[in-house]
Image (tube, rainbow, N blue to C red):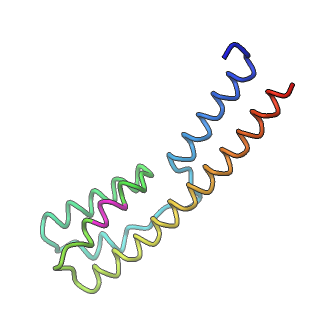
Amino acid sequence: MNNPSLTRIAAMAVMILAAAFIGCGKKGVDTSKLERSFQSAEPSAKQNVQNVVQAVEKQDYAAATASLQKLAAQAKLTPDQQEAVKEVLEQLKAKLAETAKKATGDAQKMMTDLQKSIQR
């Protein structure tokens, strides 16, 4: 890549995709009901909830989803806990879809810009 324009475009593309995957979403995921419903749970379940909360705070929605699915697989959940897990999973799925949609749009724009710069 000896062309400075291509180098700049490639650098911009990397930054755009990184920002999209980090998760610069408008609204966060509400974990308050999840945390409340597991206050009196056994230690391993509480630890899984903490893992979910920490991942959400870091906007690592894939890790939060994995931890939440692990939590959901436990057979001893109360109805309130099951509902809280379901609600947070739905929010996480929406965040992941939003992030993927944004990344796809950014990637398409990057490719269009790259094609235009090559044609010059």
Residue at the extreme right? 120
Please name the residue shown 34% across and 74% down the image.
85
> How many numbered tags mark residues here?
0
Which percent across, then down, holds residue 53? 34, 59
Foreground of the two, 67 or 110 = 110
Horizontal side of residue 58 vs 25, given as left or right: left
Residue at the extreme bottom? 79
In the image, residue 89 above or below residue 19: below
> For residue 80, what is the image quadrant?
bottom left
Magenta span contains residue 80: no
Foreground of the two, 65 or 45 = 65
Q: What kind of secondary structure does the magenta stretch mostly adopt?
A: helix
In the image, residue 22 above or below residue 28: above
Q: Identify the magenta region.
A: 65-69
Please name the residue shown 56% across and 50% down the image.
24
Q: Quadrant of the C terminus?
A: top right
Horizontal side of residue 119 vs 70, given as left or right: right
Foreground of the two, 54 or 70 = 70
Magenta span contains residue 67: yes
Horizontal side of residue 64 vs 97, given as left or right: left
Please name the residue shown 37% across and 70% down the image.
32
Q: Quadrant of the N terminus?
A: top right
Which percent across, then down, holds residue 62? 40, 55
> For residue 19, what is the image quadrant?
top right
Please name the residue shown 71% across and 39% down the image.
111
Which percent across, then down, holds residue 74? 19, 73
